[in-house]
Image: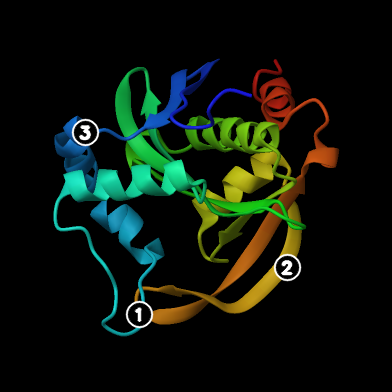
Amino acid sequence: MAKPWPVTLRDDTPAGAVVLRPLRRRDAGDWSRLRAENAAWLERWEATAPGANRYIASTFGEYVRSLSAQARAGTSLPFGVELDGALVGQLTVSSITWGSMCSASIGYWVSQSVAGRGVIPTGVAMATDYAFFLGLHRIEINIRPENKPSLRVVEKLGLRDEGVRERFLHIQGQWRDHRTFAITREEVPEGLLTRWQRLRDAP
């Protein structure tokens, strides 16, 4: 098998070319602008950490180096999300666990300007298929019950609703309930992207 990282994944969609690729230090300007422009859209869903012992990269370059180190160590797959060559968000396959579990989680954010155009469902489908290709068995996505745009993503993809996990993640200073959605390799023998393309591109 080829080296699992770095990798670039692409699908040509009705909205344009969706690409998942590693973030680069030269993305600093575009990434910072996106985060600033979408602060109100994103901040209510942003993870926080209780207490003061939280490492925060002081520069975007340090942030990218940290992500790259995690990818090389095999603990995450951190992607920038592009639409037609423009950075529009971020998607990470994280908490990768091998052994008897072979599982991981996917988290993402996207600019409000492209929300609802199938960019993130396509990205999630590509990342899930790649994780299955690497040998993982299960992918889960944890979403706050109030986050309707994100719930729409898993609805489009047909992920299984596994119920509410109470006080699951620390978000904006409080422990928040999340709904867990999951999929295993056996559920999509043809691949999640193929299934999503069939639904997305149907007349």
Of 71 and 83, the residue lying toward us: 71
Q: Residues within 10 Å of mark 3 (few under 14, many from 20)?
A: some
Q: Which residue is mark 3?
A: 27
Horizontal arrangement in the rendering, residue 115 relative to residue 159 (left or right): left
Residue type marked 2: Gly
Which mark is first along the chain, 3 or 1? 3
- Where residue 1 sits in the image (x, y, percent)? 64, 24
Q: Residues within 10 Å of mark 2 (few under 14, many from 20)?
A: few
Q: Is residue 72 above or below residue 200?
A: below
Which mark is first along the chain, 3 or 2? 3
Q: Which residue is mark 1?
A: 173
Please identify the quadrant where the C terminus is shown. Answer: top right
Residue type marked 3: Asp
Calculate the distance from the C-alpha at mark 2 to the C-alpha at mark 3. Answer: 37 Å
Calculate the distance from the C-alpha at mark 2 to the C-alpha at mark 1. Answer: 23 Å
Q: Nearer the viewer, mark 1 or mark 3?
A: 3
Of 179 and 71, the residue lying toward us: 71
Q: Residues within 10 Å of mark 1 (few under 14, many from 20)?
A: few
The image quadrant of residue 28 is top left
The image quadrant of residue 110 is top left
- Where residue 192 sits in the image (x, y, percent)? 71, 32
Question: SS at mark 1?
Answer: loop
Which mark is first along the chain, 1 or 2? 2
Horizontal arrangement in the rendering, residue 15 relative to residue 139 (left or right): left
Horizontal arrangement in the rendering, residue 195 relative to residue 10 (left or right): right
**Residue displayed at 63% across by 38% down:** 131
Question: SS at mark 3?
Answer: helix
- Model colouring: rainbow
Calculate the distance from the C-alpha at mark 1 to the C-alpha at mark 3. Answer: 29 Å
Q: Is residue 94 above or below residue 12?
A: below
